[in-house]
């Protein structure tokens, strides 16, 4: 069977498909990073190929902390995106001043709380069409 993009819910992360491929490479190494505009210095989440402040298209990469705090969360039991088993806890996590929409792994919804500390735990998802691993940012509750 040949590759059919409409059936693939995950980003194409390689340099062939994205100028933001460095984000996924770093995520696979256990590092959450984002872009900083080379012109005006704005740090943006999510990583961007252009600056929303000055429209510059040159950027550098900055690592964000590996721990953050839960800003908000919700539990989804039905109607989950393809590739996700339920129930799933989705959250907004504050990391290094940025608010990251993410999934919380190994999280008991009854024990979660706003302000709770969480730790980066990148989630491996389906390999890309060339067999390269792909990652999504995810977090687990800190001990």
Image: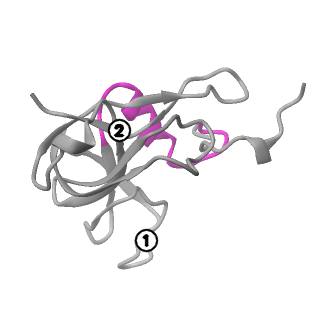
Left or right: where 30 falls relative to 84? left
Magenta span covers which residues? Answer: 14-32
Residue 130: name its quadrant: top right
The 10 Å Cα crowd at callout 1, few under 14, some 14 to 19, many 20 or more, is: some
Name the element at disc 1.
loop
Q: Is residue 37 above or below residue 82?
A: below
Residue drawn at point x = 27 percent, y = 35 percent: 107
Element type at marker 2? strand
Which image quadrant for residue 126?
top right
Residue under the image location 35 percent in, 38 percent down: 138
Q: Quadrant of the C terminus?
A: top left
**Which residue corresponds to mark 1?**
56
User: Which one is closest to the eye, mark 1 or mark 2?
Assistant: 2
x, y percent for residue 117:
11, 42
Which residue has dot 2 on it? Answer: 138
Q: Position of residue 142 (x, y in %)?
A: 13, 32
Picture residue at 11% right of the left edge, 47% below the top: 116
Task: Give how far apart the Cα atoms at labels 1 and 2 are.
Answer: 29 Å
Residue at (35, 25) in percent of width and height: 29
Structure colour scheme: one colour
The image shows residue 128 at horizontal and vertical percentages of 66, 30
Using a 10 Å C-alpha cutoff, classify the residue at mark 2 as few (fewer than 14 neighbours), some (14 to 19) or many (20 or more): many
Magenta region includes residue 107: no
- In depth, the one of 107 and 9 nearer the eye is 107
Of the pair 62 and 137, the residue shown nearer to us: 137
The N terminus, quarter of image: top right
Can residue 65 be seen in this snapshot? no
Residue 114 image point, x, y percent: 14, 56
Residue positioned most to the right = 1
Front in this rendered view, residue 59 or 140: 140
For this rendering, which residue is in front, 55 or 111?
111
Q: Is residue 31 magenta?
A: yes
């Amino acid at each position: 069977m040949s590759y059919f993009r409409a059936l693939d819910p995950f980003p194409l992360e390689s340099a062939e498909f994205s100028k933001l491929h460095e984000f996924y490479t770093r995520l696979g190494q256990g590092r959450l990073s984002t872009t900083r505009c080379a012109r005006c210095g704005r740090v943006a989440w999510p990583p961007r190929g252009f600056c929303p402040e000055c429209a510059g298209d040159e950027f550098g990469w900055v690592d964000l902390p590996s721990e953050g705090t839960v800003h908000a969360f919700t539990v989804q039991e039905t109607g989950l995106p393809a590739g996700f088993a339920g129930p799933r806890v989705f959250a907004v996590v504050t990391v290094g001043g940025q608010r990251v929409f993410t999934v919380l792994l190994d999280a008991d919804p009854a024990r979660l709380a706003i302000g709770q500390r969480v730790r980066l735990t990148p989630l491996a998802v389906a390999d890309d069409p060339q067999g390269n691993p792909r990652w999504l940012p995810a977090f687990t509750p800190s001990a």
